[in-house]
Image (tube, rainbow, N blue to C red):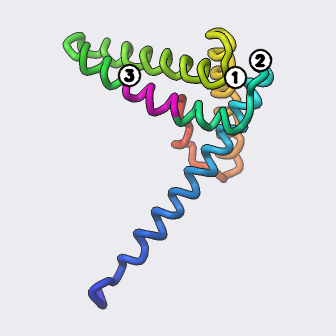
Amino acid sequence: MYGPMAGHWFVPSTSIVGLVSYLIALFIAGLILSFSAKLVGIRDASVLRAMVGIIGGGILGGIAAMVVVLLFAWTGPFAAFLGFLAFLIVYVWTIKAVFNTGWLRAFVALVIAVVIEIVVLMVLSAIGLVAIGSLKIL
């Protein structure tokens, strides 16, 4: 270290890069979910609504999963399955509420969006633009 603040300039720039990367990823995910919602026949589909659905579904689904896992921790590994199930139900409910549609259309839109996202990430990883570790389901 060559001074009192040596190396600390990198932290704010890293957080700005992380924020910009998150916003770009959110916009792309919103585009994909909006496209899949229109494909299923949801009339109120827009990129902004899709972004709200993604953020809301992730936050509310995460909270629901955490609560269910904590309540059913005594069941062992089965608690993780119940937590995932709670996450999925709350995520689909959020998309249903945001797009003002039914359960089936919301679920199919989510499944199509996940499949499209996996295909896009696989293509990007094949050409070396994305690390294969970024393939997340939901």
Q: Is residue 2 magenta?
A: no
Please state if 63 lies on the left or on the right of 134 as rendered.
Answer: left
Above or below residue 82? Residue 60 is below
Residue 62 figure quarter: top left
Q: Amino acid at mark 1?
A: Ile
What residue sits 59% from the left and 51% below the top? 23
Most common secondary structure along the magenta stretch = helix
Span shown in magenta? 56-64
Seen from the viewer's position, the closer of residues 127 and 94 is 94
Seen from the viewer's position, the closer of residues 112 and 39 is 39
What residue sits 71% from the left and 41% below the top? 123
Whole-Å distance between the Cαs marked 2 and 1? 9 Å
Q: Which residue is mark 1?
A: 112
Above or below residue 14? Residue 53 is above
Whole-Å distance between the Cαs marked 3 and 2? 27 Å
Please state if 94 lies on the left or on the right of 120 as rendered.
Answer: left
Give the mark, 3 or 2, whose residue is nearer the N terminus. 2
Seen from the viewer's position, the closer of residues 92 and 135 is 92
Q: Is residue 60 magenta?
A: yes
Q: Which residue is mark 2?
A: 40
Proximity of marks 2 and 1: CB atoms separated by less than 8 Å: yes
Residue 52 position, x and y percent, is 59, 35
Residue 14 position, x and y percent, is 47, 65
What residue sits 52% from the left and 56% below the top? 19
Q: Which residue is mark 3?
A: 64
Element on which disc 3 rests: helix
Give the mark, 3 or 1, whose residue is nearer the N terminus. 3
